[in-house]
Image (tube, helix red, strand yellow):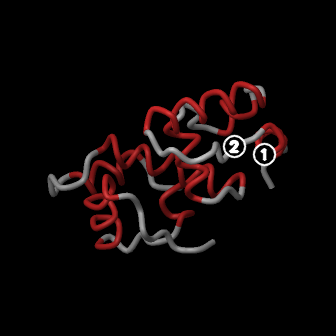
Amino acid sequence: MPAFHDLPQSFRREQKELEVAGLVQWEQLRDLSDIGMSRLCRSGRASIRNLKRLRAIAALVCDLDLAPQDAALLMHAGIASRAALAGSTPERIVQQTGRLERSLGTGRPAVVDLATARRWIERARQPLN
């Protein structure tokens, strides 16, 4: 699994703390315990909220083989776990991700269509290897 890099600016402090701790791979971030996150927050630079968000993204990246930007889109659209994705419908995913993109004012066409959403749901419903 590749290392994470080029995280959004909103996670720059957390990325720095993760790197200092030697955590540079998505699997390491996915497997980071709550205690480990608390330790990273002791410096006062990283927030537990952002670390939990990054861990949710890492779980989607690792468990479903999603691109980090797709996992982040799902997480920010309110679909932050494999179970949430598996229990969703393609229409709901398209609606939620589209709503998020419109609220961000990106002006670009939606990146998630029904076929993509169906693929993601199918992956989420597969048993873990």
**Nearest the eye: 12 or 116:** 116
Q: Position of residue 8 (x, y in %)?
A: 38, 58
Looking at the rendered structure, the secondary structure element under dot 2 is loop
Residue identifier under label 2 = 112
**Nearest the eye: 65 or 104:** 104
CB-based contact (under 8 Å), mark 1 and mark 2: yes
Q: Position of residue 57 (x, y in %)?
A: 53, 50
**Nearest the eye: 44 or 88:** 88
Crowding at label 1, few (<14), some or many (≥20) Cα neighbours within 10 Å? some
Left or right: where does residue 110 sit relative to residue 129?
left
Crowding at label 2, few (<14), some or many (≥20) Cα neighbours within 10 Å? some
Q: Is residue 119 above or below residue 88?
A: below
Residue sitting at x 27%, y 54%: 39
Q: CA distance from mark 1 to mark 2?
A: 6 Å
Residue sitting at x 64%, y 42%: 110
Numbered badge on residue 116: 1
Quadrant, the C terminus: bottom right
Residue sitting at x 56%, y 48%: 108
Give the residue type at disc 2. Val
Left or right: where does residue 67 sit relative to residue 53?
right
Quadrant, the N terminus: bottom right
Q: Position of residue 118 (x, y in %)?
A: 83, 39
Looking at the rendered structure, the secondary structure element under dot 1 is helix
Give the residue type at disc 1. Thr
